[in-house]
Image (tube, rainbow, N blue to C red):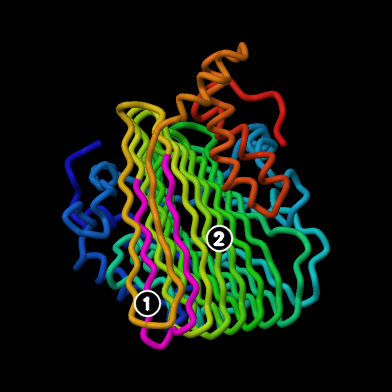
Amino acid sequence: MTATLSPTDWIAPWRAADDLPGRGLPWLDAMREAATSRFQDLGTPRRRWEAWRYTDVAPIVKTTFEPARGGTPARGEVEAALARLPGNGRFHRLVFVDGVLVEPLSVFHELPEGLRVLSFSDALTQIPELLEQHLGKMALYEDNPFTALTAAFARDGVVVHVPKGVVVDRPIEAIWLTTVGAQAIANHARNLLVAEESSEVTLLDVFHAAHNGTYLNNITTEIVAGPNASVTHIRIQEEGRSAFHVADTKIRQERDSRVCSYVITTGGRSSRNELGFALSEPGASCVLNGLFVLNGNQVADNMTLVDHQSPHCTSSEFYKGVMDGQSEGAFTGRVLVREDAQKTDAEQNNRNLLLSDDAQVNTRPQLEIYADDVKCAHGATSGQLDRSAMFYLRTRGIDEIRARQILTRAFASEIIGGIPVQEVRNHLLPVVEDRLCPGHTLEKTP
């Protein structure tokens, strides 16, 4: 750790890099240059910025990071990490080690005709027109310094193009594995998923660490759901204890499209998940479910925006937090209903469970409505484990750790149980239990 670096000094290693992919593409060169300039103008976020009041980035900008450039991973170490993750070879899988795709570790079963699943660097050479059409059109960097960094310095990421009418029967799994050495690294990555009319696809992002060293994953994801398309996006963030994680996910939905988002946060020293939906055409619907489970000194900040731009759209949002130790969680959820978005049906709920007197949560549900024929509701609650339920379990001979696990599992299962991929559900419940009670997990996972 050093004194806080200036924006120019902090990005110097990336500006000096001459191996970023896509150099020579005029539109990409222009975006990179504009984003770099914008980052230098904005500087790094401060807590006095309203949108960042619950995210302290000071530890990030006091750390000297080197650009993540991949490398030759230790085979046994990587294989052991992959064996702990949900896909276990049954999904289409891309594996990124220290920010760069490792093709020998990736797995593709028989792909539907026309489906393209590529790394960001490969997509820039094979389908640059798709990236030019969509990249940076939803996740804007003008007001978000970390999104500007991914626009300026992205080296790799996931690009998925699902043609009209194609149904992808297996999830596409992107595993982001960090194997940290002595030097802290930072990975700025861009993901793009384009699902055309009447297509169906599930994208699973898993962030995992082989060690507990210091690093930064800064990930920007853009998703386009075409007319009548169905998209499920699942993010599992189980980074190392000294890791920093910043995510900006933006989704545009067209007529009658359906998008389900699941954001599960259990790892990292400090993490921020920013999620934005634009329901741009009539009939679009979205589901936003999230769970953050923290202990020790972990911090997690969740910010969501559902922008109802057209009539006859629906949104359902349910976020839960579990905080133990001296951890700090935050949820800011905004639902915006524009003047022309009549017949909107929007619901938002945030519930939080505090397992320690030193844990804290900040919750800010917001409704901003400019239409008059709508159905909207929101709410937030925070509290501790039900003492009567704890007493009931203890009087039945169940020890305190197990009783707390049973009640916490019931609380978390409401989110985890809704994830439509069984392998992911089976993976998450033991992870949640181990985060709260290390070394203690219930014997059976439903």
Determine whether the residue tagged by mark 2 lies in a helix, strand or loop.
Answer: strand
Q: Secondary structure at mark 1?
A: helix
Dot 1 surroundings within 10 Å: few (below 14), some, or many (20 or more)? some
Residue extending farthest bottom = 340
- In which quadrant will I find the N terminus? top left
Which residue is located at x 20 percent, y 52 percent?
47
Q: Do the numbered discs 2 and 1 sit on residues whose CB atoms are within 8 Å?
A: no
Q: Amino acid at mark 1?
A: Met
Q: Amino acid at mark 2?
A: Ser
Q: Position of residue 349 (x, y in %)?
A: 45, 55
Q: Nearer the viewer, mark 2 or mark 1?
A: 2
Q: What residue is disc 1 on?
A: 31
Q: Is residue 54 rendered to the left or right of residue 272? A: left
Q: Position of residue 305 (x, y in %)?
A: 40, 66
Q: Which residues fall within the magenta stretch?
A: 330-352
Q: Is residue 374 visible?
A: yes
Spot occupied by residue 26 in the image (x, y as percentages of width and height) = 42, 83
Q: State left or right for residue 35 relative to residue 342.
A: left
Q: Is residue 342 magenta?
A: yes
Residue that mark 2 sits on: 261
